[in-house]
């Protein structure tokens, strides 16, 4: 649990730290933040192949930043995170149980087919979110200022994620009421 909290804090603060560090600290030293983000994810390695690939990708970005002393590899980390989430959620659509259903089943519930179909659609919506969010993070990394990149990846993207969570929760309540689930 403490490592999960540390991972969340590092992930949330990463874009802001890059922004505040830009011009003050060389990118090769800021790469240490990415190393910290990777280190906090190490316990998840035993859980999934996507987590392992995500860590490998982050290490490549960190090595590129340390070697080139450029900020761009560090700004691509949120793109990598979205790609990893898209891979995990997208892969689950090719299996009998979608990612959203798998998470819902952690509470020990069993679901009727109508609910399973709903959760598959929610998984598809999240895949769409990760595509759009990752594309915007990529565009801001390449063409926007560090301030705009930090604002989007460190604030706006999380607000959009919270908005999607909230909207889905309201739709789910209505779905449950309509389908008596």
Image (cartoon, rainbow, N blue to C red):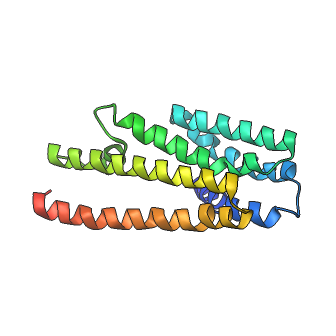
Residue 17, visible in the rendered structure: no
Residue 79 in the image: above or below residue 156: above
- Is residue 37 found left or right of 155 in the rendered image? right
Q: Residue at x 74, y 45 (%)?
A: 73
Q: Residue at x 56, y 38 (%)?
A: 51
Q: Position of residue 158 (x, y in %)?
A: 53, 64
Give the camera-side residue of 129 and 45: 129
Image quadrant occupied by the N terminus: bottom right
Q: Residue at x 53, y 35 (%)?
A: 50
Give the camera-side residue of 36 and 166: 166
Residue 55, visible in the rendered structure: yes
- Is residue 120 found left or right of 130 in the rendered image? left
Image quadrant occupied by the C terminus: bottom left
Q: Residue at x 86, y 48 (%)?
A: 28
Asked where in the image residue 168 lies, by quadrant, the reply is bottom left
Residue 152 in the image: above or below residue 121: below
- Is residue 36 found left or right of 158 in the rendered image? right
Give the camera-side residue of 63 and 1: 63
Give the camera-side residue of 140 and 81: 140
Asked where in the image residue 147 lies, by quadrant, the reply is bottom right
Q: Residue furthest front?
A: 143
Q: Position of residue 174 (x, y in %)?
A: 19, 65
């Amino acid at each position: 649990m403490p490592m999960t909290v540390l991972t969340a804090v590092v992930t949330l603060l990463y874009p802001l730290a890059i922004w505040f560090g830009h011009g003050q600290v060389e990118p090769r030293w800021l790469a240490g933040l990415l190393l910290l983000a990777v280190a906090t994810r190490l316990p998840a390695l035993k859980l999934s192949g996507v987590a392992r690939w995500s860590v490998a990708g982050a290490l490549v970005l960190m090595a590129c930043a340390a070697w080139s002393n450029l900020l761009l590899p560090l700004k691509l980390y949120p793109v990598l995170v979205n790609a990893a989430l898209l891979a995990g959620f997208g892969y689950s659509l090719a299996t009998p149980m979608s990612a959203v259903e798998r998470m819902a089943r952690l509470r020990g519930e069993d679901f009727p087919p109508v609910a399973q179909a709903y959760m598959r659609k929610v998984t598809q919506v999240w895949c769409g979110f990760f595509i759009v969010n990752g594309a915007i993070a990529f565009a801001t990394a390449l063409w926007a200022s560090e301030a705009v990149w930090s604002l989007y990846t460190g604030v706006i993207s999380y607000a959009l994620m919270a908005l999607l969570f909230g909207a889905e929760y309201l739709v789910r309540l209505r779905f449950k009421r309509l389908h008596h689930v």
